[in-house]
Amino acid sequence: MDWTTAPDAFIERCVLAIGGRTALYGVRALLMHVRRTMMQPPETIELEILRAFGGRIRLIERRPGCEPRVIVINGFAGQVMEQGRLAPLSALELEAIKRRIRLYPRNFLAHAEEYDYAPPVADRDTDGDPIWRLDLPSEEVSYGFDAAHFQCRFLEDRETGERITYSDYVATDGILTARREQCWRAGQIVHEDDILYLAFNVPFDDADFTVL
């Protein structure tokens, strides 16, 4: 098929590649444990991320020798607990977190009808492998989908200057998820995320998302 003349069909093919629309729409909550390896300066951060339907996020960040930093987002409100002090989350950090989650490839594909995207264009990745490049002009991002398997290989964010690569796809409850992400800026790797644990539709307490 000529995907350049059928962008909606291309989106459906990419959705099918990671599990299908029924599986994606069935996700109401997810829990992830992530090991983040920072490059400069070298540091390992443990992240526990709980997300629930309705724009609710709870992120616990653990650094060696430090008390956990806890971020809670509920819709358009957010707060951070750090060193025993509770404070509103800054508007910039709130928007950055919500934007990163909104533009995560799986989330974009599940809600692609909400965006104006350009028809895919045949291109090649940095390693020379063929890809389909899909642009979202309003968000200033581009996605690169593997031409053979239609899984997302990268997200290029012109607003932040970041290139995020996705690899090591593994199925959980019928949904393929990249278990490794690398964030690059100016050709240098900034950090690498390894998803150590992932579960969908986990039970949770609404109180976990309370913003005071």
Image (spheres, rainbow, N blue to C red):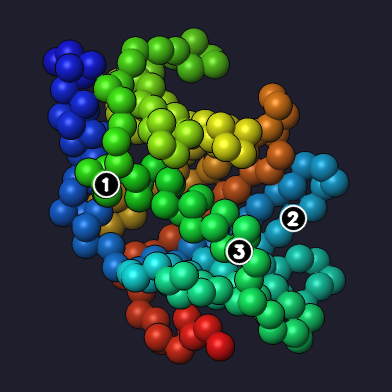
Residue identified by numbered label 1: 114
Q: Which of the 4 quarters of the picture holds residue 91?
A: bottom right
Q: Residues within 10 Å of mark 2 (few under 14, many from 20)?
A: some
Q: CA distance from mark 3 to mark 2?
A: 26 Å
Q: Amino acid at mark 3?
A: Ala
- The image quarter containing residue 206 is bottom left
Decide if residue 169 is in sight here: no
Q: Amino acid at mark 1?
A: Glu
Marks 3/2 in contact by CB < 8 Å: the verdict is: no
Between the residue at mark 2 and the residue at mark 1, the CA separation in whole angstroms equals 36 Å
- Residue at disc 1, secondary structure: helix
The residue positioned 61% from the left and 39% from the top of the image is 160
What residue did someone put label 3 on? 91
Of residues 206 and 158, which is closer to you in this image?
158
Classify mark 3: helix, strand or loop: helix
Q: Earlier in the sequence, mark 3 or mark 1?
A: 3
Identify the mark nearer the N-term, 2 or 1: 2
- The residue at 63%/33% (across/down) is 161
User: x and y percent of residue 97 in the render?
Assistant: 55, 57
Q: Is residue 162 above or below residue 134?
A: below
